[in-house]
Amino acid sequence: MYILPAIDLRDGKCVRLIQGDYNRQINYNDDPVAQALLFEQQGAQWLHIVDLDGALHGDQYNLNVLKDIRESTSLNIEVGGGIRTEDSIAKLLETGINRVILGTSAFEQQQWFHEMVRKYPQKIVLGMDAKNGMIATHGWTVTGKMTVLEMAQTVNNLPLAAIVYTDIAKDGMLTGPNLESTRELAENCLIPIIASGGVGTLQDIVNLKDLPIEGIITGRALYENKFTVAQAIKALE
């Protein structure tokens, strides 16, 4: 199991949205490259990046920032947010991004999504974001009619690198992850699960360690000095 510190980009800066609400933004660092380097110095091997502008508008708004982070660190990087065409996927992979996260496009264009996963095996991550157990898309602004478990069943046999599962109600709240729903998904899915949302203490890391998951994403807790990446990694040990 590994820790993935998160960088959420908006207007080229590191921010966090409370429960995915674009009107409830906290600004943390104007220099995403410096932030990525700090995470790397603390022992991170992976970095989780979300282009919030891209998630909302459906295009790559922070590509230059992503390139700068790629060129400045040796971290493994996964990127999500607004990736809805094969051209966007190819462009990111050519930049040296290790994994591309697809969310909205995976649900709205399921046949295309399946084709992309097979064309780029172990390079695609499914971003599964949920409100009250139902899939949410378009930067969490639209809630669909498919449940998390229903979606998981449709991708079980695909060569996905992972599924990032986020309980939106927990995201950015520092009140602890949704252990029950995360466990239920992990136990009913063959794809490796990465948990996201709600991590606020080292005890939350310890609690997640007991689940059959592959990774843990943490963001706001790091920015607000609840713990460091190094301490999170040690908690996993």
Image (spheres, rainbow, N blue to C red):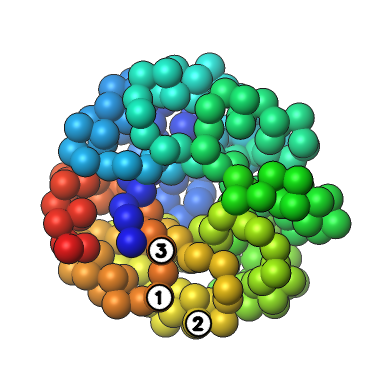
- Helix, strand or loop status at disc 1: loop
Q: For the point 50% across and 41% down, which residue is it?
A: 78
Q: In the rendered view, tell whether residue 182 sits above or below residue 93.
A: below
Which tag, 3 or 2, sits closer to the chain's start? 2
Residue 214 is marked as 3
Residue 140 is marked as none
Hey, what amino acid is under mark 3? Glu
Residue 89 sits in quarter:
top right
Q: For the point 17% across and 63% down, which residue is it?
A: 237
Q: Residues within 10 Å of mark 2 (few under 14, many from 20)?
A: some
Figure disc tally: 3
The answer to whether the residue labelled 2 contacts the one labelled 1, judged by CB atoms less than 8 Å apart, is yes
Q: In the rendered view, tell whether residue 113 sits above or below residue 35.
A: below
- Helix, strand or loop status at disc 2: helix
Hey, what amino acid is under mark 2? Glu
Tell me, yes or no, if residue 25 can be seen here: no
